[in-house]
Image: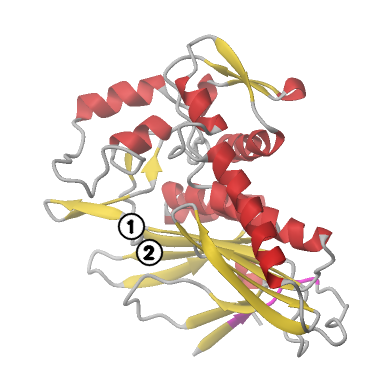
Amino acid sequence: MRRVLVPADVDPAGPALGGQLHTLQGRTMGTTWSVRFVGPAAPDLPSWQQGIQAQLDAVVAEMSPWEPASDLSRFNRAEAGTWRVLPPACFEVLAHGLDVARRSGGACDPAAGALVNLWGFGPTGRYDEPGFQAPADAEVQAVREQGGWERLAVDAGARRVLQPGGIELDFSGIAKGFGVDQVAAYLSRRGVHDHLVEVGGELKGTGVKPDGQPWWVALETPPGAALDDTVVALHGLAVATSGDYRRFFEVAGHRHAHTIDPRDGRPVHNGVASVTVLHRACVLADAWSTALTVLGPDEGLALADREGLAAHTIVRGADGRVHERWSRAFEGMMS
């Protein structure tokens, strides 16, 4: 059985006359990107490739904790008590992260980088390297007490952020979505209305294909999950998924996934296998999918309903089987 989702409001504009479908691909943020767009029969594809890659390279240069020279890494190394001015895009991502942190009670925390690193999901001391061991309770508590979004002081007018000491920003749960938005905006500025952008599984679609059909995509599900297919028309919509099957390690039969609950400093163990969020901004779909994963199926979907978010949750039962739950906004898109 197939479930079909469509947005409530659809742009009445049809496909570009005479347009043809083109596909470009590349690598960024440790993963891949792809773009499909409707353009003239013989566009200068190398120019488009370079332009798209430049948008994503700029995100990496500002926000990657793997790049020592990035603005984010320089903030993380700054002396306690010093203010750092962030570039506009970097500050915008931080602002989105802090807003979701406030709305979710800290379930999505852009200042939890030290915890991410402690559990082996950062650029060094990784869980997949020889000799890695899960941290002890005392280590987790010490790192958690040093971090946290509430310790950040922000001067929005000057785009300044105070490093109080010990704070490590990490935008891994939001930067890919922002990259998708940046590429989509770049295509629109260059006059390409009809496009589908994907970075590491996060997507955003605008307009339609040459045949007038929207950009149909299947929602991601955990490997081996026996669930009905769900396809969505990404017509002015973005989609992001957070799942416990992407990066994880096991200790004594327990899976420790890469999503950390900043409130207790540990990988989430609440039965959530994945959360998918549909939103007009991919950066917010990305952030909210992380926050709802941390909150768990009950609290997460309750918050999704309060925020009007279209969210789909897959939960693992005690017997290992999975089942689906969704928010009211998600259900309202079903046709």
Front position in the image: 111 or 326: 111
- Give the secondary structure at mark 2: strand
Residue at x 42% of width, y 72% of height:
221
- Name the image quarter holding residue 235: bottom right
- Whole-percent x, y for residue 313 in the image: 47, 63
Q: Is residue 127 above or below residue 255?
A: above
Q: Which residue matches tag 2?
A: 315
Observer able to see residue 328: no
Closer to the camera in the image, 19 or 267:
19
| Kind of residue at disc 2 | Val
Q: Which residues are magenta?
A: 4-9
In the image, is residue 201 part of the stretch drawn in magenta? no
**Whether residue 228 is visible:** yes
* Prevailing secondary structure of the magenta residues: loop
- Label 2 Cα crowd, 10 Å radius (few <14 / some 14-19 / many 20+): many
Q: Residue at x 67, y 32 (%)?
A: 87
Q: Provide residue 121's location: percent of width, then percent of height.
A: 33, 44
Verify CB contact (< 8 Å) between mark 2 and mark 1: yes
Picture layout, residue 290 above or below residue 44: above
In the image, which disc is placed on residue 172?
Answer: none
Q: Is 187 situated left or right of 72 in this image?
A: right
Using the image as rendered, state which of residue 327 and residue 170 is in the foreground. Answer: 170
Q: Nearer the N terminus, badge 2 or badge 1?
A: 1
Please state which amino acid type lies under the numbered disc 1: Gly
13 lies left or right of 177? right
Q: In terms of image quadrants, where is residue 40? A: bottom right
**Residue 140 position within the rendered picture, expressed as x and y whole percent measured from the top left:** 27, 29
Disc 1, SS: loop
Q: Residue placed at 46% from the left, 27% from the top? A: 148
The image shows residue 253 at horizontal and vertical percentages of 14, 56
Q: Which residue is mark 1?
A: 271
